[in-house]
Amino acid sequence: SQSGRLVRVYGGAAPARGVESTWREKAARYADSKVRIAQFAAAELVAPGDIVFIDSGTTPAAVARQLSTRDDITIVVAGLASLLELADGTVEVIVLGGRLRRTSASFLGQAADHLLDLIAPDVAFLGTDFLDPKFGANFPDLEQAIFKSRVIARSTHSWFVADESKFGVSAPFRHWTRIEPPTGIVTMASTND
């Protein structure tokens, strides 16, 4: 319980609600699914000449890895993990900038908001902590939820890229971004909704 991952309850312990794993902890989980999702997204959802927004998160970073050697697109990146995947590539890269939110390795704040206002991505690949058919995409803080909504509004097409860990019984956090057409989900998870 000292690490914050468990909460003492009557008769034992239960998982703590809303404990955020770091991006490094998430990177190795469901790695095969992330690669397959990224391969599909890069091959099927990105066209020559596109401006591609890539969010923070380990599945968006896998998409960045797949696109890193393209010479016919421009990538706008909002996460450190994605930026690292692109650093040794040949693709044109624009870094959103802003304040580094260390847990998710995302760039947020006024600088990120300002640069986002100056671009109109053709396609955006977004990360999330959880997906719910009723509420949408779930995040640890309100600033992230607002930022994702702004990215969706600025982009022609938006896709949440999510491995099977993003679906389940209950959302870990209380901040949401709605998922409405034309925004979609790319996943390997089997869903009934």
Image (cartoon, rainbow, N blue to C red):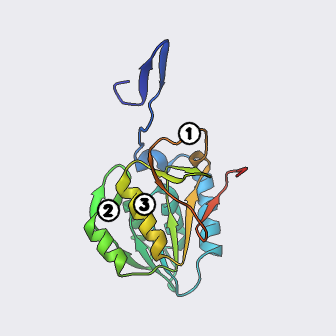
Q: CA distance from mark 2 to mark 3?
A: 10 Å
Residue 56: numbered disc: 3
Quadrant for residue 91, please give it: bottom left
Per the model, the C-alpha gap separating discs 3 and 1 is: 22 Å
Q: Earlier in the sequence, mark 1 or mark 2?
A: 2
| Type of the residue with mark 1 | Ser
- Assess disc 1: are there few (<14), some (14-19) or many (≥20) residues with their C-alpha within 10 Å of its C-alpha: few
> In the rendered structure, which disc, 2 or 3, sits on the residue that comes first in sequence?
3
Closest to the observer: 126 or 29? 126
For this view, does 110 lie left or right of residue 145? left
Q: Amino acid at mark 2?
A: Leu
Q: Which mark is residue 108?
A: 2
Where is residue 100? Give x, y as percent: 29, 58
Q: Quadrant of residue 87?
A: bottom left
Quadrant showing the N terminus: top left
The residue at the point 32 percent across, 62 percent down is: 108
Identified at 62% across, 54% down, the residue is: 33
Element carrying mark 1: loop
Left or right, residue 46 beside residue 108: right
Residue 169: percent from left, percent from top: 60, 38
Question: Is label 1 or label 2 in front?
Answer: 1
Q: Which mark is residue 170?
A: 1
| Residue toward you, 21 or 14 | 14
Q: Residues within 10 Å of mark 3 (few under 14, many from 20)?
A: many
Q: Position of residue 164 (x, y in %)?
A: 62, 48
Q: Residue at 34% across / 25% down in the picture?
A: 2
Q: Position of residue 11 (x, y in %)?
A: 49, 12
Instruction: Give the image quarter of residue 9.
Output: top left
